[in-house]
Image: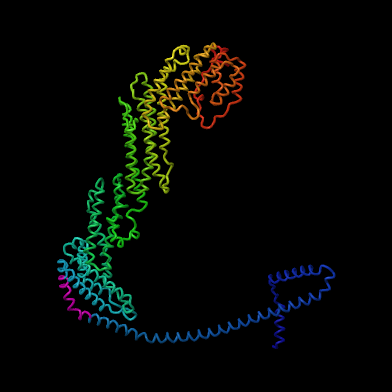
Amino acid sequence: MSDGDKIGCDNHEDALVPVEVWPELERAECLARGAALKWASGVFCRPEHLERLGQYRKRESQRTTSIQSRLKSVVQSYLEGVDWGLGQLREARAELREVSCDLHKARLETSKNSDEVTTLETLREVSLNHRQLLAAVSNLPRLYKVRSMVLETERLVESRRLLEAHARLMELERWQDEVLLQLQGPKGPSGTGIASADEELVLNYFSGVGRLVDALAKELWAVIGSGLSLSHQNPTPFVSAVRIVEREEALDEFFLEERRSASGHNRPMPPGRPRCWRKHFFEVLEEAVSSRFRSVSYLHTRGPGLASHLSALQHGIMGDLSTVRNLLEQCVPPHYHITRAYLRSCHQFLQTHLGLVTGWELESGEIFAVLNWVLHIYNSSEMMGDPDLVPELQIEDLGPLISQEGIEQLQNKYVQKVRKSVSEWMHKALEVELTDWQRDQEPDIDHEGCYHTSLPTIITQMLEENARVALMISEALRNQTILMGLYEMENLLSRFRGAIIEFGKENHRNATTNSNKFYLHYLLACISNCIILKTSAECLQQQLCSFPSNRFSRVPPGPLAALDRAVRKACRLVMDHLLFELQPHLQGLLCRTWLVQEDVTPKMCEVLERHCELYNRVRQPCRQRLKEECQRLIVVEYVRTLMQKRLVCRSNDERCQLAQRLAQDAQQLRDHFQSMEIDGTIGEVNPTALILALADLINLKDPSMLTLEISELVTKYPDISEEHVSVLLDVRGDVPKDVRGSVLDFLEQSAPPLPPGYRPIFSEILVPSSSMPFCLPNAKCT
């Protein structure tokens, strides 16, 4: 068939077979047409643009030609790569055929030589048996001597001739290794090695060697464990034991090195190797140290004997250290660093032992002994802080005897135990204080002439002593102890204040019988006690504040505030007692008989003088405070009596007489206070000046001037109310309604604010409610 016919046939077949069109091709053609139309519509949007149609056609034709040429070059390069790859595959197939033929020839040669290999296996077995028989014949003299040498070596071990025993043992082990090596032969592709049954037979025959090793090791460790005692008597056994350890260490290193080498790579280690006796030497030393010190007063460790036990540990360790440094170091090689090893063993034993001790339920004294020993004695120059020992003992590597967390837990336990003790002592001291209050004699007087009891001395000495003892451990523990003491002082003062209140109630109940005639004296002693405790608390707080690193774990205690509350309550009870004794005399004031009798105020002054003399038994500043409160109390009660309207003036003469008596009483009170060295002013206002001001108000001749007079009174005493002024106008008895109304209106409009630092006085004076005449006596107002 001609080429034309073939082409025609091909075309005919193509015409019969439907041409498959790829959907991606159709989509690409559509996108291209769309893009072309979009571009053409944008370029030829006007008729005049059609003039450049030829230019666009030529440019696009050139671009199309360029793209077609690039495509042809890419297809050409791709076809060349495919052709090269096909050539490589053909070459690989030819090479694989050659290798397959060679392997087939090798397989045929191997099958021809199989009979010869079987013959060689038989020869190998015969050779192995011959070698084993030769080894057995050559070693018969040694084998006959094994049992006798084992018995002789056992006798040498029992008599502690350790070096000779070890020499015999080494010879026996050498025989055993040679027999095993000769029977075994070299292992590898051409050798099968010794059978396990033969190896077991040899090991059973030399089983006495293993027993000798164990017996010798037992004697060695016994000698090494008692090395400290032997060094004083006869160090020869210890030296012999060290030499044996070094021999065994050298043998271990030799066999390991031979096994690592190329020539002995397949040689097995002898039975029981490596023994690592040097490592076990230090383990035995560590166990000997633990056993030695566990017996030091161990039965008396708990309880009061703990401090003695720690002291015994210290002396035992330092004594043994002297032996190790002066004797044992001469018996061992330098690379043993025997002193360092002993120190490490002691340190590890103490870590374990103190961990056990701190797990007990220790009392405060025992905890103090442990903390002091761990933090101060152990690291001092008397023990591990010795300059000669510092290079040997690396505490940083070994760690502390007790971890920081353990130290903090011990300190917290110590503070808790001390707190319990302090609380009990404070409770007992308060009970003694309450018993002293019932004594039928006045309190003790100190060198300054002030009342006091034993309570502040007990509390102060207790807290200061605990802080001093805690400081021997650390500043942090001292701060914790001080903080605890301040909390307990605050609790004590709360109970103390409650006891003062109960003391006052009991005295009030027994006021008629006067069962406790020294009631006031002990109240004053309580105030002095609080001042002493305040000084102690401030000193403790200053010690806390002097360390900025101190941080309170919770709200800091407030003993000063509790002290202030207790002092205020005691002072209030003192003033209540003064008021109780003044009450009979206050009943006689500001009545018509009082106008003619002049003995009431002097009697009041006598009571005040007696009280103020007792106030001199109180420490400053409460001494002055009590006197000032006494002055204020008498003025307030005097004015309160005036406000009760016992005396209402009916004429100018009565008003003049009343004003004169008020001025006379005010002057007497002022002179009396000055004679008792009481400052006449509280803040910027003189309390007795109030009585003079009221006298001037009552003595005013012209009622129309009352507004001006009361305005001055309001300026000096801005807390005066309308009710107070109304009562004063009633006492005058001559104020018209219009003047009264204008005065009250003025008060209502003015009402000045209280100036800073002013202490109200009229606020403490209640005005009795006036009766309403227009209400029925027995009916309620609606």
Nearer to the camera, 214 or 779: 779
Q: Quadrant of residue 585?
A: top left
Q: Position of residue 128 (x, y in %)?
A: 27, 81
Identify the residue at image location x=54%, y=26%: 716
Q: Position of residue 445 (x, y in %)?
A: 32, 30
Relative to 134, say whether 363 is above or below: above
Q: Confirm whether the magenta stretch covers residue 206.
A: no
Left or right position of 42 against 219? right
Q: How is the image coloured?
A: rainbow
Identify the residue at image location x=64%, y=81%: 77
Quadrant (top left, top right, bottom left, bottom right) of the C terminus: top right
Give the main secondary structure, helix, strand or loop, of the magenta stretch: helix
Q: Position of residue 336 (x, y in %)?
A: 27, 66
Nearer to the camera, 33 or 529: 529
Q: Quadrant of residue 613?
A: top left
Question: Which residues, given as a range, are shown in magenta?
Answer: 135-152
Identify the residue at image location x=42%, y=15%: 599
Relative to 299, say whether 283 is above or below: below
Relative to 383, say whether 46 is above or below: below
Left or right position of 442 against 770? left
What is the residue that sits farthest to the bottom in this orientation? Answer: 2
Q: Position of residue 344 (x, y in %)?
A: 29, 60
